Image (spheres, rainbow, N blue to C red):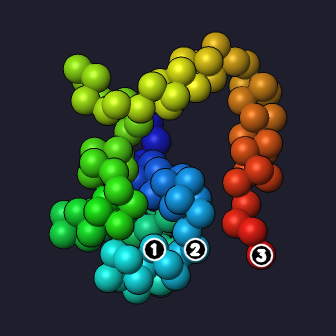
């Protein structure tokens, strides 16, 4: 089972990158320190409910999306995410690693 702090951190980072925000910009929007964003994204620190709410608001997502991309009863209205997740589920581990590398390259913040 993946450590919840690490999963939370990866999803915070994914949403931040999706919005093309730096850690500094997210920290400013969420009214927390850049160091805190870095520790959360790295999985070395968790976050209290207040910080989770601040991050979710800064990222424009439901707080639950910072723990899992899947919610019951279609609560998330993000069909593209559902389609991508479904397609990825059928890939082998080596194919998933290739896609991960491709995504990391494609989603790197522009300098």
Q: Do the residues labelled 2 and 3 touch (CB within 8 Å)?
A: no
Residue 101 appears at what percent x and percent y?
Answer: 78, 44
Q: Is residue 3 visible?
A: yes
Q: Are marks 1 and 2 in contact (CB under 8 Å)?
A: yes
The image shows residue 92, relative to residue 25, as above or below, that is: above
Residues at marks 1 and 2, CA–CA distance in whole angstroms: 6 Å
**Who's the residue at 62% across and 18% down the image?**
87
**Who's the residue at 44% across and 68% down the image?**
40
Packing grade of label 1 (10 A; few <14, some 14-19, many >=20) is many
The residue identified by callout 1 is 26
Residues at marks 1 and 3, CA–CA distance in whole angstroms: 17 Å
The image shows residue 103, relative to residue 1, as above or below, that is: below
Residue 57 appears at what percent x and percent y?
Answer: 29, 63
In primary-sequence order, the first of circles 1 and 3 is 1
Q: Give me the disc on residue 22.
A: 2
Q: What element carries label 1?
A: helix
Q: Residue furthest top?
A: 90
Quadrant of the rendered image containing residue 36: bottom left
The image shows residue 83, relative to residue 15, as above or below, that is: above
**Who's the residue at 45% across and 58% down the image?**
12
Quadrant of the rendered image containing residue 93: top right
Compared across the picture, whether 12 is left or right of 110 comes to: left
Q: What element carries label 2?
A: loop
Task: Tell me the quarter of the image containing the N terminus.
Answer: top left
Packing grade of label 3 (10 A; few <14, some 14-19, many >=20) is few
Q: Give me the disc on residue 85.
A: none
Residues at marks 2 and 3, CA–CA distance in whole angstroms: 10 Å
The residue identified by callout 3 is 111
Residue 20 appears at what percent x and percent y?
Answer: 59, 63
Q: Residue furthest left?
A: 50
Q: Is residue 6 visible?
A: no
Q: Is mark 3 on a helix, strand or loop?
A: loop
């Amino acid at each position: 089972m993946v450590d919840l702090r690490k999963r939370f951190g990866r999803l915070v980072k994914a949403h931040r990158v999706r919005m093309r925000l730096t850690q500094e910009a997210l920290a400013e929007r969420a009214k927390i320190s850049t160091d805190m964003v870095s520790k959360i994204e790295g999985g070395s620190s968790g976050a209290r409910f207040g910080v989770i709410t601040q991050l979710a608001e800064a990222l424009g997502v439901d707080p639950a999306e910072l723990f899992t991309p899947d919610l019951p009863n279609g609560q998330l209205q993000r069909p593209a995410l559902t389609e991508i997740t479904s397609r990825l589920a059928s890939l082998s581990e080596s194919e998933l690693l290739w896609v991960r590398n491709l995504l990391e390259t494609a989603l790197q913040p522009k300098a």
